[in-house]
Amino acid sequence: MKKLLRALGVILFLGLLFVVGSLAYSTWRGRITWYFRVHGQVVVNAAETSGYLHANSQKTILLLTRTDDSRPETYLVSLGPTKTVLDCGDWHPVRFLPFPVADVNPPCTVSTVDPAKLHDPPDTASVTSGRNFVEFSTTSGKKVRGQW
């Protein structure tokens, strides 16, 4: 029994080592981008919510999750020279943990989001941003602001 548990422990350790090594290699090669929780606030119609923010390690993409409705709504905001906002549909990130996203199948692209499942899509023409905030309107007329 002792040998069986030791062998199982070695197999689990090697499997974990393989997973960690694969993530590290893919991150180093640029195939995986990590998103980390950003200390900030989500404000909807001038009322602070319990929403949360995540940003990629280059700080070029912000994932803004608002929680003022019955279900969370996440928006992918590009912070580059051309500001764009995409709705992530049903998907939303885990609140506190950092998470990896592969470049092969990102969660918030036009091809992966079902338009029928969009709750309150953004109005992309209304995006404004500053040094530490981004603000946009939704099709229902709500003004969403993420500030950090």
Image (cartoon, rainbow, N blue to C red):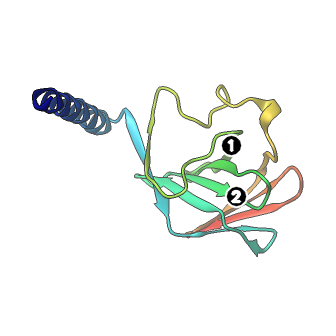
* Residue 5 left/right relative to 101: left
Badge number at residue 57: none
Q: Nearer the viewer, residue 45 or 80?
A: 45
Q: How many marks?
A: 2
Image coordinates for residue 51, horizontal then vertical, percent = 65, 63
Residue for point 30% across, 36% down: 23
Image coordinates for residue 92, horizontal then vertical, percent = 62, 46
Q: Nearer the viewer, residue 116 or 130?
A: 116
Residue for point 79% across, 57% down: 69
Q: Is residue 58 above or below residue 15?
A: below
As helix, strand or loop, the secondary structure at mark 2 comes to: strand
Quadrant housing the C terminus: bottom right
- Could you tell me how far apart the alpha carbons at marks 1 and 2 are, in whole angstroms? 14 Å
As helix, strand or loop, the secondary structure at mark 1 comes to: strand
Which residue is the site of mark 1?
A: 86
Residue for point 74% across, 29% down: 114
Using a 10 Å C-alpha cutoff, classify the residue at mark 1 as few (fewer than 14 neighbours), some (14 to 19) or many (20 or more).
some
What amino acid is found at the position of numbered circle 2 in the picture?
Answer: Arg
Q: Is residue 138 visible?
A: yes
Going by the picture, which residue comes out furthest to the front? 1
Badge number at residue 66: 2
Ranked by sequence position, the earlier of labels 1 and 2 is 2
* Residue 117 left/right relative to 16: right
